[in-house]
Image: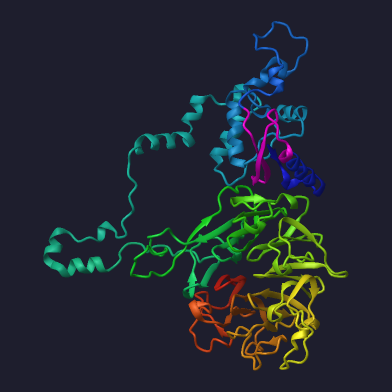
């Protein structure tokens, strides 16, 4: 069954969701069973049990018989004219061929209406939208002639086959059957010396011919619309990921997956090659370690669906369509897919509980997820340890739960860490819940920097979303933030970068006191206006307005993407995309960084 949810209102989506829930509950040998649902071609597809026999209507109809000679009700369905095709293609002749060609060229039917009478009127008047001028005049003229209202003026089949538009491909079909396509040689054959010249010149002439390029130069490739890089997890320097000539506008990385969203709304994944292939994981016993490589693939099965946002967790992924529909796939452990179960899903599947809401953003932690609606509502699901869901307890949920926010706060952006969650509000403040280890969520009421906080005043867990209490972040206008494993970072309205949490590996920057749980202004970036920030397990990344990328913290396994000189201080990462470039999206998770940039 197909339900067009893309154009539905909120109430209509709720009705579709209720229909799915009712179908799930029905289990009877005489009722067609519900299996699952998925999104395809901007419609909710409900997979149900196949019924090989006829329905109730078919069993109660009279047996087929010859047409009667007299009819008292003149109707196309009574005359069985509709048995030759749908109303859009009723006549099985040249006109129907024109309808098919028009739909192939325009991706829509030539005649459309809300009901059958209106459709018949459109067909009778021959009113349809003009064909796009991207097609040749010959093709447009052919379709117009096929759709002529006068049957006698429509071309016959042999006339159509004689058209140059059809004759040339047919001729090529007969002449090229069995041929093998060969590459054009790089050198011009005229540049090859004759036999006599070769004998006279000897090896020197032949070498000269082979060493130089003759003929027209190859056209230069157009510059890439964007460049995507990754490093860490054993990759010491930024690795340029393969990508077709399309622009990537947002990226996200998890423990095992790397994903991005293109400007055209497609979801792209970067994966390692299979075992044994160049750049892929080495087979057991291999002695040579090759440079890691990745292959690019677009997610299949989502034709007609426009993706605008993606978020990766550990072994699962969530993506968001331009219509506010959330789809998840991957490992279903801890209920992080939000489907009401703990089973794995290989293809993106709609989170049915959110169909009645227009979701604008989603975020994924290691085993939980958050979603934000257009009306400022926040939903959480997955693992609930440490209170990371913000529901006031530590229970896990396998379906989205509405989260209560403190009075006077409206959510604008949601963030997920390994064991914590954060919300940036519309008035540019921080709300956080989950594990506050090392005060990474700013929940301690800290005193001046440099003085350690008594253990009795340290907050280790927060079960509900609570405002930041640690000065000066509690008083700053926050425009960006990210959560790492044991620390976090934030950007204020002036473009200054603050870090807070554990500084065991220097991920807070060159601070003098490690015992304090207070936020620190990162030294070395005072002259840089920071626009983006990312936190990994033990490192931090910041992007400046000038396009420079800075990293600091633990340098093992290529986390910093640069030389290991002064790892505790912000130092630039050398990308192939030289400034001025614009880093449009960055994602850090565990020991990996994924970044996409484009030329300004």
Q: In this rendered view, identify the residue nearer to me: 566 or 421.
A: 421
Residue at the outermost top position: 69
x 49%, y 77%: residue: 558
Answer with the quarter of the image where residue 154 lies.
top right
In the image, is residue 565 above or below residue 363? Answer: below
Q: Residue at x 77, y 58 (%)?
A: 401
Does residue 393 appear in this view?
yes
Instruction: Indicate yes or no whether the magenta region holds residue 29.
Output: yes
Residue 474, quarter of the rendered image: bottom right
| Depth check, front residue: 535 or 513 | 513
Return the x and y of residue 457 as percentages of the image width and height: 78, 84
Q: Can you say which quadrant of the picture contains the N terminus?
A: top right
Residue 453 belongs to the span the image colors magenta: no
Residue extending farthest front: 456
Regarding residue 145, the answer to whether it shows in the image is no
Figure coloring: rainbow
Which residue lies at the image location 62% right of the left edge and 41% below the top edge? 107
Q: Residue at x 48, y 71 (%)?
A: 239
Q: Position of residue 240 (x, y in %)?
A: 49, 69
| Depth order, front residue of 31/540 | 31
Choose between 574 and 450: the one closer to the eye: 450
Residue span colored magenta: 23-51
Horizontal side of residue 215 vs 471, given as left or right = left
């Amino acid at each position: 069954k197909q339900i067009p949810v893309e154009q539905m209102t909120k109430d209509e989506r709720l009705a579709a969701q209720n229909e799915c829930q009712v179908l799930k509950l029905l289990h009877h040998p005489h009722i067609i069973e519900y299996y699952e649902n998925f999104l395809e071609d901007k419609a909710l597809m409900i997979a149900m049990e196949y019924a090989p026999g006829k329905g109730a209507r078919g069993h109660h109809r009279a047996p087929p018989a010859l047409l009667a000679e007299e009819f008292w009700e003149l109707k196309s369905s009574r005359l069985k004219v509709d048995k030759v095709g749908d109303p859009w293609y009723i006549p099985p002749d040249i006109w129907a061929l024109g309808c098919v060609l028009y739909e192939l060229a325009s991706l829509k039917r030539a005649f459309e209406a809300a009901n059958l009478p209106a459709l018949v009127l459109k067909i009778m008047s021959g009113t349809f939208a003009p064909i796009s001028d991207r097609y040749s005049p010959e093709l447009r003229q052919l379709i117009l002639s096929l759709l002529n209202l006068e049957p006698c003026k429509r071309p016959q089949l042999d006339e159509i086959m004689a058209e140059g538009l059809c004759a040339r491909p047919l001729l090529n079909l007969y002449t090229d059957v069995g041929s093998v396509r060969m590459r054009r040689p790089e050198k011009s054959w005229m540049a090859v010396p004759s036999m006599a010249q070769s004998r006279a010149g000897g090896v020197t002439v032949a070498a000269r011919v082979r060493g130089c390029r003759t003929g027209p130069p190859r056209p230069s490739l157009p510059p890439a619309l964007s460049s995507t890089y990754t490093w860490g997890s054993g990759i010491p320097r930024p690795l340029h990921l393969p990508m077709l000539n399309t622009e990537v506008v947002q990226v996200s990385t998890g423990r095992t997956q790397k994903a991005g969203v293109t400007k055209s709304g497609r979801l792209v994944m970067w994966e390692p090659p299979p075992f044994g292939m160049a750049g892929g994981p080495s087979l057991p016993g291999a002695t040579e370690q090759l440079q890691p490589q990745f292959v690019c693939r677009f997610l299949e099965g989502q034709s007609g669906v426009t993706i605008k946002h993606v978020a990766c967790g550990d072994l699962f992924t969530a993506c968001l369509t331009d219509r506010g529909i959330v789809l998840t796939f991957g490992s279903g452990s801890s209920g992080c897919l939000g489907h009401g179960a703990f089973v794995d899903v290989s293809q993106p599947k709609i989170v049915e509980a959110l169909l009645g809401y227009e979701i604008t953003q989603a975020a994924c932690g290691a085993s939980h997820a958050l979603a934000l609606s257009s009306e400022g509502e926040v939903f959480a699901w997955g693992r609930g340890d440490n209170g990371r869901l913000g529901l006031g307890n530590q229970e896990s949920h396998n379906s989205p739960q509405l989260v209560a926010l403190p009075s006077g706060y409206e959510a604008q952006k949601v963030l997920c860490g390994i064991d914590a969650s954060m919300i940036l509000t519309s008035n540019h403040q921080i709300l956080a819940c989950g594990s506050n280890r090392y005060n990474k969520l700013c929940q301690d009421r800290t005193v001046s920097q440099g003085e350690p906080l008594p253990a009795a005043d340290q907050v280790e867990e927060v079960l509900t979303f609570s405002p930041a209490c640690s000065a000066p972040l509690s008083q700053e206008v926050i425009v960006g933030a990210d959560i790492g494993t044991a620390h976090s970072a934030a950007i204020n309205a002036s473009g200054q970068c603050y870090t807070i949490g554990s500084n065991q590996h220097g991920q807070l920057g060159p601070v003098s006191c490690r015992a304090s749980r207070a936020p620190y202004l990162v030294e070395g970036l005072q002259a840089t206006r920071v626009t983006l920030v990312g936190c990994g397990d033990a490192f931090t990344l910041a992007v400046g307005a000038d396009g420079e990328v800075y990293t600091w913290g633990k340098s093992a396994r290529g986390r910093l993407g640069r030389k290991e000189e002064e790892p505790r201080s912000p130092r630039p990462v050398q990308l192939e995309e030289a400034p001025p470039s614009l880093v449009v999206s960055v994602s850090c998770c565990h020991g990996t960084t994924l970044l996409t940039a484009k030329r300004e």
